[in-house]
Amino acid sequence: MSRPWHDLCYVGAVASRTVRARLDGPSQEALATLMREGRNESDAVRTALIEAGQRRQRRSALAEEVRRLAADPADSAEREAVMADMDAIAADWPA
């Protein structure tokens, strides 16, 4: 028994959304860089979006940690103590 035509058309994952963009010079160069790694345009764009999203998530997590530590009195006291210790052993700057 042969398979219906629609079963043959949808093999694997189907993209859930199509995005169109006009690329400027730097964007075209970045796309070309990713494509030189063996990716087609769609794979290159998906890879770039995923990597950019991951970088933003890491940056946001780091910024949140900095805010949390800055608001922590115990951490602030420890940081000030370490800085005072380092100042005490640092060599004087040349005059």
Image (cartoon, grey):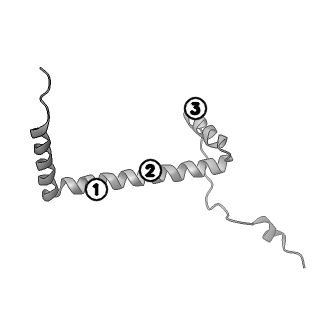
**Residue 89, how many percent across, how many down?**
12, 39
Task: Identify the secondary structure beneath mark 3.
Answer: helix
User: Is residue 4 rendered to the left or right of residue 86?
Assistant: right
Amino acid of disc 2: Arg
Q: Residues within 10 Å of mark 1 (few under 14, many from 20)?
A: few
Query: What's the mark number on residue 25?
Result: 3
Amino acid of disc 1: Glu
Residue at the outermost top position:
95
Q: Nearer the viewer, mark 1 or mark 3?
A: 1
Foreground: 65 or 91?
Answer: 91
Contact? badges 1 and 3 (CB < 8 Å): no
**Residue 3, how many percent across, how many down?**
85, 74
Q: Which residue is mark 2?
A: 55
User: Is residue 13 rendered to the left or right of residue 9?
Assistant: left
Query: Alpha carbon of mark 1 to alpha carbon of mark 3: how far?
Result: 36 Å
Q: Residue at x 14, y 44 (%)?
A: 83
Q: Which residue is mark 1?
A: 65
